[in-house]
Image (cartoon, grey):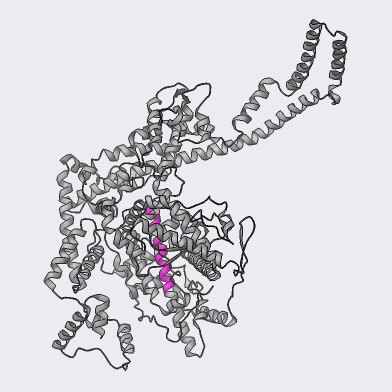
C-alpha cells in the first residue's frame, strides 16, 4: 500500500530511506494499523511482484532503456531554449508521464540532463565562435583587460544607465556607439533562443573579469558575446527610458511654469479689470467721475438741436462728441500704464488662459534638442501598428532640423484632402501651439519639434513605437509569434479554465457579466446594506466586524508570551535544514557549486539580502564570513529565478501545516503568481485599492485568477453594461445613461488572438508581466493590445463591483484578505531594516525585494511552527482551543525575534528536530475565515 501511494505521487518507487516517517504514519493510520507495524515487502521476489501489481493498477510500463532514449530526445530539444537543469528535468518528467512510463531515479535523470545540456551548450558556443571573425574574438577577449583605472570594459557592460541628466544623456549616446562597435552580435547569435542568450549573459554577468578569464576559451568568448548582445539591447533600453524621462520632466516643468505664469497673471488680470472699471466709470452717464463729460455732452446735444437741418454742423458736433469719449477712455488707459503695457497683459492672459502648457515645453526642450535629434538618428524606431504618423512627423522634423527659420511646412498629409492630417495625432492644444492662421500650411518649427518628441516618448511608453534591437522597448508582438503560441493554446486555456476560441471567450465573459447584474438586481429588495439613489450612486451601510472574543485574546496573549526567542539567522538556518530551499542556488552555469557547506554559505546570504545590508556591512556583524564570500554567493549563485524557486518551496511547505487551515488561505505568505511556480494555484488574488486598473483585471482573468481588490471608491467607478438592450428594474441607474458605457464584445473577439499571445508569452517566460503592465499603464490611442485589455478589464471589474455590492460575506473576505496582505507587507518591511534600495540596477533592486520576500516567508513559516508547538503545550495543560481562536492569531509575531546585534555563525550548525505539520488536537472542519 505504501508503494502504491508513493508511486501515485512520484511515478517511481522510492527507496525505504527516502520515505518520510510522517508519510508512513499517515498510511498506517488510514489502514487502522498499530504503531508498531512497519512496511516491509518481506523478500525481493515479493517486492518485484508488488511493483508489478502497482504498475498494472496505474497503467504504467517499466522500460529503462526506452525511458533513457525518450528522456534524451526531450532534453535535447528543450535544451535549445532552456538552460536550468531543473527545467530540463521537468521537461523529461512531463514527457515520460505523458507516455505512461515509470520514471528513473532523480540522480539518473539529473545526470542525463546535465550531460546533454553540456553537449548542447558546447555546440552553441562553437557555433557562436565560428560566426565571429578573429577581430571580433579579439574584441571580446579585450573586454577583460583591466585598464589603468583598475576597471575593465567588461565591468561597464554590466552596469545600467544612471539618472537621466543632460550630461549623462550625452554619455549614454556615446556608450551606444561603443557597444555597437564591439561587433554585430545579431549575426553571431542568429537562431539561438533568446532565453539561452539571457542565461549565458547572466552567467557572464555573475562573474568578475578575473574569474571569467579562467574559463575555457570557447565558452568565455561565447558568454562575452551574449553579454555584449544584452548590453547593446540595454543601451537602447536605457536611451529610450532616458528620453521618456526627460520629456516627462520637460512637460512637468512646463506645467509648473504655467502655474507660475497664472500666479503672475492674477495681478495682471486685476490691473486689466481695474482699467476697464475706470473706462466704464468715465463712460457711465450716472457716474460722478464723468460730470465734465456729461456737461460737454449736454452742450453738444443743445448745439445739435439748434442746428437741425445743417448736415455739416451735425457732423462736426458728432466728431467733437466722439473725441470727448476717446479722450476719456485714453486718459483711463494711460493712467493704468499705457496701451502697450495693457495689450501685452491681454496677450499673456489670452495665451495662457487655458491649460496650454504646450507653448512652454520648448523652453526646457531646447537644451536637449541636439542630443535628442542625434538619438533619433541612432535608434531604429518602428510603429507597432499601421499608424506611423508620429514617426513620419519625426522624420519631417529631422529633415528640417538644420534650418533656422521659425516656420517650416506641415508634415506630409495622411489624408490627401486634409492638409493638417499630418499632425492629426496631436491634441487640440498642441495643434493650436504649432499652427498660425496667418501662415497656412506651415508649423512653428520649435513648438513642432517639442511636440513630436513628447508624442514619441508617449508612444514608446505605451508600445505604439518599438525600438529595434532593444528588449524592454521591443515590439512585444515579436516576443512569441502566434505560430509558436498556437500549439500551446489548448493546454494553456485548459490550465486557466478559459475557452480556447474567440466566440467561446466572449461568451464566457458576457455570461459572467449578465449573471452578476441579474443576481444583484434580483436580490436588491432583500439587500439591507445597499441603497442606490436617484442619481445612480450606490451606498453601502457599514457593518461592524465581529471582533475577537475574550478567550481568543487570552489565547493570543499566552501564545505570544510563550513564543521561544529566535534570531533571524537561526530561523533561516533551521528552515534550511528542514526544507533545503537552498538547493536551488548555485553557479549560473548550473554545474555543482564548488561550495562544500552549502547551507552555511547560502543561509547568511539570504539573511543579509533579506534584511537589506551590504556584504561588507554584514561581515562586520557575522564572525567567520567575509564580505567577498557573501558578495560572490549573492551575485553569482543567486538569481531571481532561483529565488522564486526557493520561495515556492516555502509556500508549498507552509500550505501543508495544519495551523494554516485556521487562517483560511495561503495569503499569509507572498508570491508573484506569474513567476513563482507553486502547486498551490490561488483562485482569488487580493490587492489594495490601486489594484483596480483595467489591464490588471484583464491579466488576472487570462491567468485564471479572480481579482478582488479592496474597493473603497466604488461610488466614483463606472459600471459598464453588457448589453444596451437590457433594462434592470432596480439597479439600472448604476449603469448610467442607456446606450452608453456598453462593452464592445466585437473588439474583444477581434483581438482575442492578441490577448492570448500576450498571456502565453508571459507563461512561457518570453514577456515579463511587469513590462506588460508598464506598457499598459497609459491610455493609448491606437495600441490594439491596450484597447483589448481595457475592454476585457471593464467587463471583469464591473462583475467584481456587482458581486461586491451583492454579497456581504464577500466584502468581509475581501477586507480580511486585504488586511492580511497589508500586515504581511508591514512585516516584510520590518524585517528589511537595513535601509533603502541603494542599487540603481532594476534587476538588482528586484533581487533584493525577492530576498526580503524569501526571508519574510521563512519567518512566517517558522512562526507558524512555533505557534503550533505552543498550542500543543497549552493542550497538554488543559486549554480548550478552537480553530476559530487560532484563526485570530496572525503569524506575524515579532516580539520574540532578535533582529540586531552580533550574529553567531555556529547557529547554522545546529540541526533542529523534525517539525510536525499536524495539529491533531484542533478540529479544522468548517473553519470560517477570521475577519
Prevailing secondary structure class for the magenta stretch in the rendered image = helix
Q: Look at the image and say whether residue 857 sits in the magenta stretch.
A: yes
Seen from the viewer's position, the closer of residues 201 and 153 is 201
Residue drawn at point x = 34 percent, y = 37 percent: 379
Residue drawn at point x = 40 percent, y = 38 percent: 169
Residue 771: where, in percent of width, then height? 39, 51
Residue drawn at point x = 33 percent, y = 75 percent: 577
Seen from the viewer's position, the closer of residues 175 and 226 is 226
Q: Look at the image and say whether residue 141 sits in the magenta stretch.
A: no
Relative placement, left or right, of 497 versus 367 is left
Above or below 736: residue 92: below
**In the rendered picture of this protein, how many numbered marks are placed on residues?**
0
Residue 748: where, in percent of width, then height? 40, 52
**Image quarter in which the N terminus is found:** bottom left
Which residues make up the magenta segment?
A: 834-861
Q: Can you tell which quarter of the image residue 67 is in?
A: bottom left
Residue 44: where, in percent of width, then height? 14, 87
Relative placement, left or right, of 14 versus 475 is left
Res. 835 in view: no
Residue 395: where, in percent of width, then height? 37, 30
Amino acid at each position: 500500500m505504501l508503494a502504491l501511494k508513493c508511486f501515485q505521487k512520484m511515478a517511481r518507487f522510492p527507496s525505504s530511506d527516502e520515505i518520510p516517517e510522517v508519510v508512513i504514519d499517515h498510511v498506517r493510520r488510514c489502514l487502522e494499523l498499530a504503531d508498531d507495524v512497519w512496511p516491509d515487502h518481506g523478500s525481493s521476489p515479493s517486492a518485484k511482484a508488488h511493483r508489478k501489481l502497482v504498475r498494472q493498477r496505474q497503467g504504467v510500463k517499466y522500460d529503462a532503456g526506452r525511458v533513457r532514449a525518450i528522456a534524451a530526445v526531450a532534453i535535447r530539444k528543450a535544451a535549445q531554449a532552456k538552460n536550468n537543469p531543473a527545467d530540463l528535468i521537468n521537461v523529461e518528467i512531463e514527457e515520460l508521464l505523458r507516455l505512461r512510463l515509470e520514471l528513473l531515479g532523480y540522480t539518473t535523470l539529473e545526470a542525463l540532463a546535465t550531460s546533454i545540456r553540456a553537449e548542447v551548450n558546447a555546440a552553441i558556443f562553437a557555433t557562436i565562435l565560428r560566426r565571429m571573425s578573429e577581430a571580433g574574438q579579439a574584441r571580446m577577449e579585450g573586454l577583460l583587460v583591466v585598464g589603468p583605472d583598475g576597471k575593465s570594459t567588461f565591468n561597464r557592460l554590466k552596469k545600467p544607465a544612471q539618472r537621466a541628466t543632460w550630461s549623462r544623456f550625452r554619455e549614454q549616446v556615446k556608450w551606444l556607439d561603443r557597444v555597437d562597435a564591439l561587433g554585430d552580435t545579431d549575426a553571431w547569435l542568429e537562431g539561438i533562443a533568446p532565453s539561452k542568450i539571457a542565461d549565458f549573459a547572466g552567467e557572464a554577468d555573475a562573474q568578475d573579469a578575473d574569474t571569467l578569464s579562467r574559463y575555457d576559451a570557447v565558452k568565455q568568448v561565447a558568454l562575452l558575446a551574449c553579454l555584449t548582445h544584452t548590453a547593446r539591447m540595454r543601451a537602447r533600453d536605457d536611451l529610450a527610458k532616458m528620453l521618456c524621462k526627460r520629456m516627462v520632466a520637460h512637460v512637468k516643468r512646463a506645467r509648473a511654469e504655467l502655474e507660475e505664469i497664472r500666479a503672475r497673471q492674477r495681478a495682471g488680470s486685476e490691473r486689466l479689470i481695474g482699467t476697464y472699471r475706470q473706462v466704464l466709470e468715465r463712460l457711465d452717464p450716472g457716474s460722478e467721475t464723468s460730470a465734465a463729460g456729461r456737461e460737454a455732452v449736454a452742450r453738444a446735444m443743445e448745439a445739435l438741436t439748434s442746428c437741425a437741418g445743417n448736415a455739416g454742423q451735425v457732423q462736426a458736433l458728432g466728431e467733437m462728441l466722439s473725441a470727448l469719449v476717446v479722450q476719456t477712455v485714453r486718459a483711463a488707459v494711460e493712467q493704468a500704464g499705457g496701451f502697450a503695457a495693457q495689450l501685452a497683459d491681454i496677450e499673456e492672459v489670452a495665451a495662457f488662459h487655458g491649460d496650454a502648457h504646450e507653448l512652454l515645453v520648448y523652453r526646457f526642450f531646447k537644451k536637449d534638442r541636439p542630443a535628442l535629434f542625434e538619438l533619433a538618428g541612432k535608434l531604429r524606431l518602428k510603429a507597432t501598428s499601421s499608424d506611423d504618423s508620429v514617426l513620419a512627423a519625426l522624420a519631417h522634423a529631422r529633415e528640417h532640423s538644420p534650418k533656422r527659420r521659425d516656420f517650416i511646412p506641415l508634415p506630409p498629409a495622411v489624408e490627401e484632402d486634409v492638409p493638417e492630417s499630418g499632425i492629426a495625432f496631436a491634441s487640440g492644444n498642441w495643434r493650436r501651439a504649432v499652427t498660425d492662421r496667418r501662415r497656412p500650411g506651415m508649423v512653428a518649427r520649435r513648438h513642432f519639434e517639442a511636440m513630436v518628441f513628447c508624442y514619441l516618448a508617449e508612444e514608446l511608453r505605451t508600445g505604439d513605437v518599438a525600438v529595434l534591437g532593444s528588449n524592454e522597448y521591443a515590439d512585444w508582438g515579436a516576443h512569441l509569434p502566434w505560430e509558436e503560441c498556437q500549439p500551446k493554446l489548448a493546454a494553456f486555456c485548459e490550465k486557466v479554465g478559459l475557452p480556447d476560441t474567440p466566440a467561446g471567450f466572449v461568451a464566457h465573459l458576457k455570461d459572467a457579466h449578465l449573471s452578476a447584474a441579474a443576481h444583484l438586481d434580483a436580490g436588491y429588495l432583500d439587500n439591507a446594506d445597499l441603497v442606490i439613489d436617484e442619481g445612480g450612486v450606490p451606498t453601502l451601510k457599514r457593518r461592524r466586524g465581529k471582533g475577537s472574543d475574550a478567550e481568543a485574546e487570552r489565547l493570543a496573549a499566552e501564545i505570544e508570551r510563550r513564543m521561544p526567542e529566535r534570531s533571524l539567522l537561526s530561523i533561516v538556518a533551521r528552515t534550511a535544514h528542514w526544507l533545503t530551499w537552498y538547493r536551488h542556488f548555485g553557479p549560473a552555469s548550473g554545474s555543482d557549486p564548488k561550495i562544500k557547506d552549502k547551507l552555511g554559505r547560502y543561509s547568511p546570504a539570504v539573511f543579509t539580502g533579506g534584511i537589506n545590508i551590504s556584504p561588507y556591512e554584514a561581515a562586520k556583524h557575522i564572525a567567520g564570513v567575509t564580505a567577498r564570500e557573501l558578495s560572490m554567493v549573492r551575485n553569482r549563485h543567486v538569481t531571481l529565478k532561483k529565488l522564486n524557486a526557493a520561495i515556492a518551496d516555502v509556500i508549498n511547505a507552509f500550505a501543508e501545516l495544519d495551523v494554516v487551515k485556521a487562517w483560511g488561505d495561503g495569503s499569509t505568505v507572498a508570491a508573484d503568481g506569474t513567476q513563482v511556480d507553486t502547486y498551490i494555484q490561488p483562485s482569488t488574488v487580493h490587492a489594495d485599492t490601486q489594484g483596480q486598473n483595467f489591464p490588471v483585471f484583464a491579466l488576472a482573468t487570462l491567468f485564471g485568477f479572480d481579482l478582488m481588490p479592496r474597493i473603497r471608491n466604488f461610488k466614483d467607478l463606472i459600471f459598464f453594461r453588457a448589453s444596451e438592450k437590457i433594462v434592470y428594474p432596480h439597479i439600472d441607474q448604476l449603469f448610467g445613461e442607456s446606450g452608453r458605457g456598453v462593452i464592445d464584445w466585437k473588439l474583444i473577439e477581434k483581438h482575442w488572438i492578441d490577448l492570448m499571445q500576450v498571456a502565453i508569452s508571459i507563461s512561457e517566460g518570453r514577456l515579463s508581466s511587469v513590462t506588460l503592465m508598464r506598457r499598459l499603464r497609459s491610455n493609448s490611442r491606437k495600441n490594439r493590445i491596450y484597447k483589448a485589455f481595457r475592454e476585457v478589464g471593464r467587463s471583469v471589474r464591473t462583475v467584481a463591483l456587482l458581486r461586491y455590492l451583492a454579497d456581504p460575506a464577500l466584502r468581509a473576505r475581501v477586507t480580511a484578505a486585504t488586511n492580511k496582505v497589508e500586515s504581511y507587507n508591514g512585516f516584510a518591511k520590518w524585517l528589511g531594516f537595513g535601509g533603502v534600495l541603494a542599487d540603481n540596477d532594476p534587476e538588482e533592486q528586484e533581487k533584493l525585494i525577492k530576498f526580503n520576500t524569501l526571508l519574510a516567508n521563512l519567518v512566517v513559516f517558522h512562526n507558524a511552527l512555533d505557534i503550533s508547538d505552543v498550542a500543543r503545550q497549552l493542550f497538554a495543560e488543559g486549554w480548550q482551543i478552537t480553530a476559530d481562536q487560532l484563526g485570530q492569531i496572525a503569524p506575524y509575531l515579532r516580539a520574540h525575534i532578535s533582529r540586531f546585534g552580533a550574529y553567531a555563525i555556529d547557529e547554522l550548525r545546529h540541526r533542529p528536530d523534525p517539525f510536525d505539520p499536524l495539529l491533531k488536537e484542533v478540529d479544522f472542519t468548517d473553519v470560517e475565515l477570521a475577519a
